[in-house]
Image (cartoon, grey):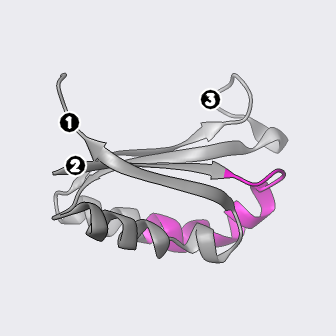
Amino acid sequence: MYYAIISEDVPNSLAMRLEARPAHIARLEALKADGRLFVAGPHPAIDSPDPGEAGFSGSLVIAEFESLEQARAWADADPYIAAGVYQSVTVKPYKIVLP
């Protein structure tokens, strides 16, 4: 089943994001290589695809896991959590309807 992992950043997280980004992306690439990643990306803090110094307000990952517990465990191990980027993470089941 697919699960949505919705994360909210702490204020002024850009520097911490940049430092932890390679490890964060490596985990997403592993999901992609396994054919389990539906979509992943950050939420710009301003209405722009390139927010510059404004940074990001959070992230969304939708990926396939065997259970909600497994999805939560994967989310809890995110390098952005260890780096202090995320202030909260919500994991919930997701049903693909379209496209």
Magenta-drawn segment: 9-26
Q: Nearer the viewer, residue 5 or 43?
A: 5
Q: Amino acid at mark 3?
A: Pro
**Mark nearer the N terminus (2 vs 1):** 2
**Mark identifier at residue 95:** 1
Residue 12 belongs to the span the image colors magenta: yes
* SS for dot 3: loop
Asked if residue 54 is positioned above or below residue 99 in the image, the reply reads below
Rendered location of residue 53, percent (x, y):
84, 43
Q: Quadrant of the C terminus?
A: top left
Residue 83: image x %, image y %?
Answer: 68, 74
In-front residue for pair 97/52: 97
> On residue 49, which mark appears?
3
In front: label 3 or label 1: 1
* Residue 25 drawn in magenta: yes
User: Does the residue at mark 2 contact the one at mark 1 (Cβ under 8 Å)?
Assistant: yes
